[in-house]
Image: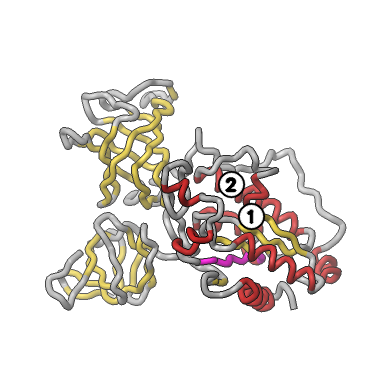
Amino acid sequence: MNRPHLDFRGFCGTIASGRIRKGDEVMVLPSRKKSRVKSIVTYDGELEEAFSPLAVTLTLEDEIDVSRGDMLVRPENVPQLADSFDATLVWMSEEPMVPGKQYFIKQTTKLVSGTIATLRYKIDVNTLHRDQAPTLALNEIGRCQMKLNQPIAFDGYRNNHGTGSFIVIDRITNATVAAGMILQRTTGDKHDHWDEQADDRLQTERSNVTAEERQARFGQQPTTILLTGLAGAGKTTLAYALERKLFDLGRTCCVLDGQNMRHGISRDLGFTADGRSENLRRSAEVAKLMNDAGMICIAAFLAPREEIRQKAAKVVGKERFLVVHLNAPIDVCRQRDQEGLYGAADEGEIANFPGVSAPYEEPTDADLVLATHEIDVDGCVEKIMGLLEKHGAVS
């Protein structure tokens, strides 16, 4: 931060990609607070716009905290925010790599501690053959899984060299021991099925009943409403109250509840970030089938990551996917917790619990935000009904 006097508060940094203009909306990561660019200051004076790779000072319209290592991004183009990723690593030290050893990881201006959790394979630079190896020696290259002690914001190196590269620093000698390039996708022990393609030999069969015929029969536009929020925000309660309202009005609808899914189709999943992602992926496929059948689907899921919510919208179809954010404060959610989940998370008995030991990313562009600590269930139902009418799902 640059603050030469009380009347000036600027944030210095280098533009990694794209352009920035006065008046543009920006989001701070990892806090996800938003503001707009008030001015772009350089040594030679103010600019109307700046572009990569200029080093500039930005002033914002709002007094929000931006710390060293934080990233300013466009709300509609948010990089990944995670504490683990796969990377191609070039080892640059005579001391061999030690998997599991604590190192410093420096990415952009962010410095965090972490480990090289796994060496997946070593790459022969002459043949590009992949060899199994326990470690990397000087000038050797390998694909590794990195695990950090706190999340960082990053892109794949192929998309953005600035935010997709990092160095590894020895904590004792302070020497740079490796350089890395973050891979776009992670594989191995992270089972991400979102981008997988079906077998080319499989064919898609089409129903003899058209979407227009279903809409005429049910008198509604098929829509999926995702209710997202912290545990205790009221997602399940509101989902079933909304279902009751729609049913009483003669609409055809169904609730997909995250916990109910885990009793059946997702019973094999855990509660890691990957487990929650896969639960939502499977549920999005079910919601799509419900919408294809002409039904309104009410989905109640914690869904803590914005990236995964966007992927769910793509599966269902963005034109029929609505996001309703239940933004009750965490203190209220704790008071509502009858199962002791927050207490167990505080004690470390439940890992990766959003809001306690894992982040919850608020939707960047929710169709409706409901303060469920201020509005009762009936009031919330009426507001969602208004959203559905505005969207053309019901009349």
* Quadrant of res 375: bottom right
Which image quadrant is residue 312 in?
bottom right
**Residue 176 magenta-highlighted:** no
Tell me which amino acid carries mark 1.
Val
How many labels sit on residues? 2
Q: Which residue is mark 1?
A: 315
Tell me where the magenta segment starts and ends, as one range.
320-327
Query: Neighbour class for label 2 at 10 Å: few (<14), some, many (≥20)?
Result: some
The residue indicated by pointer 2 is: 194
Q: Quadrant of the N terminus?
A: bottom left
Residue 256 place in picture, x, y as percent: 68, 55
Identify the image quadrant of the C terminus.
Answer: bottom right
Please report the residue visible at 81 percent of the width from the left and 53 percent of the height from the top. Answer: 206
Q: Are marks 2 and 1 in contact (CB under 8 Å)?
A: yes
* Any part of residue 342 in sight: yes
The dominant secondary structure in magenta is: strand
Q: Residue at x 53, y 60 (%)?
A: 336
Residue at point 31%, 33% (across, down): 90
Say which element carries label 1: helix
